[in-house]
Image (cartoon, rainbow, N blue to C red):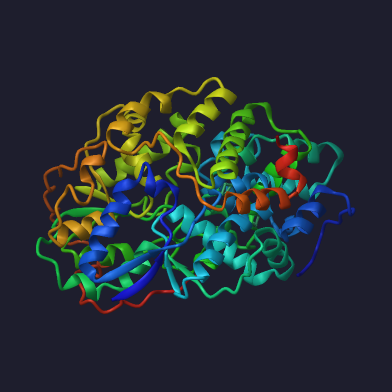
Amino acid sequence: MIKIAYYPGCSLLGTAREYDESLRAIVKKMGIELVDVPDWNCCGASSAHSLDHDLSVALPGRILMQAESLGLEDLVVPCAACYSRLMMARHELMEDAALKARVCEMTGMEFRGTVRPINIIEFLQKYSDTFTDKITAPFDKDVACYYGCLLVRPPKVTNFDRPEDPRSMDEIMSLLGSKPVEWDFKVECCGAAHSITRAGLVGKLSSKIIGNAVHRGAQAIIVACPLCHSNLDMRRNFINKAAGRKYDIPVLYITEAVGLAMGIGEKELGLHRHTVKVRYPEKVKVEAEPRPKAAAATKPTPAAQTEQTEEA
Amino acid sequence: MSATTHHHDADSLAHKLNNATGVSPTRCYQCGKCTAGCPMAEEMDYTPSHILRLLQLGLEGSEDRVLRAYSPWVCLTCEVCYARCPQEVDIPKMMDFLRSESARLKKVNPRAADFLSFHKTMLDSIRYVGRLYEVGMIMGYKLRSWHFLEDVLMAPSLFFKGKLKLFPHLIKNRKNISQIFKKSGNARTEAAK
Ligand code: SF4
Ligand code: SF4
């Protein structure tokens, strides 16, 4: 059994429960055991770095230090926002000896840097062998893969995929039998940081994202971040208000799509917790002219890892 | 680093920023790419490149304008500007610094008061619970700011979907967390109280 350290983060215990549930459901079938970071704390979210720099490194720093005690290398962090905070902290702790000394003093622990946070896409890429052979119900939908800000930026820190037009998630969806659509808002910000303080503004940003996905013929939007999900799903009413129309397109976590393709039940994956019902709009007719080349590149490829272009 | 065209006294805001974060406003050559891509530029009183210009000039009144700006608070830390800047100016880091400085110096833009309440409420939750506690946060934030009702109205439906917990998930070693907060003793969090 493969063992991997796991940091769920606060959202996955609350508003993003189905992300946690679907992840746990798929790893069971993939033959992977997730080991929770012992007594984990909040990473500090968007608030610690807004008011106190040292704190914004020490909180995720403590998580990394706690994870080190497990003796595992990979730490899967499904929340893109937590992932970003952990990567930032790790980056700073590795580069700044004085900061590292201060943070170790604050936490009363040692930082060795032995644990490497990976996001959910990296996780699924790395272990794609363990689910591609179990696909019984291909997820044959036209999908818009939405990466958001924090998986690809800042490229220097996350060092993951191409910052302006990433493909990794599209490739995974192709493995599941989906057809990723080409669209324009893959890495646009949904405004999550202000969803509580400026709901109307966030509705405006998110409505552009949903509008473009629908316009490009997507039947579902696939996300890898609980904040993106809650903005596009839970706060759909703000989006509809900003757009002046009603959008029905469902928003799925990538782990839910993997689970559905593996034949896992909707309930077990937590689909009933969504605000927007998971019902797919009709496929739009394929346009007459051939698709651009880039789309052809995302045809289902064998489980082998496709090479990534480093751009930063 | 090449041609530095602007010089700063040790106590200029640009210098303090550079000292605290390593971000150097002198690197910016005002191409405007950051502002062009910033999803919040429309909402800001000073765009990201404008802030950099004000810091470069380092004039009497301009530093105060930067500290009292609304922009840092409305910045989403989406990292678009930094990813696209040809000079690799880490603007999100600069915004972090400006927020904490303006909170420390009590120069927070009045329109940003609710952002400050929000962050304080979040940090309180982490400080005492170890994790974010949504119900507690909503209550806390409500008490600190008035115009906030939407999420409270959303609460019952979330509760029935099993997404809202009425009790916090306390972590065991809360002492360790409060020690981190105390030691960060970085006057900032305290001053922001
Ligand atoms: S993109 Fe960089 S160099 Fe250009 S204006 Fe913005 S900070 Fe200055
Ligand atoms: S990080 Fe802030 S300043 Fe930079 S593009 Fe995003 S919102 Fe604008």
Q: Position of residue B177 (x, y in %)?
A: 61, 51
| Nearer the observer, B158 or A72 | A72
Q: Where is residue B64 in the image (x, y as percent from the top left)?
A: 79, 37
Q: Is residue B125 above or below residue B143?
A: below
Q: Position of residue A271 (x, y in %)?
A: 21, 45
Q: Is residue B140 above or below residue A151?
A: above
Position of A244 with respect to A155 (left or right) is left
Q: Which residue is drawn at 62% across and 50% down?
A: B175
Position of A41 with respect to A178 (left or right) is right
| Nearer the observer, B22 or A230 | A230
Q: In this view, does A116 lie above or below B63?
A: below
**Quadrant of ligand 1 in image:** bottom right
Position of A223 with respect to A189 (left or right) is left
In which image quadrant can residue A94 be found? bottom right
Q: Is residue B85 above or below residue B68?
A: below
Q: Which residue is drawn at 81% across and 48% down?
A: B13
Q: Position of residue A274 (x, y in %)?
A: 26, 40
Position of A252 with respect to B168 (left or right) is left
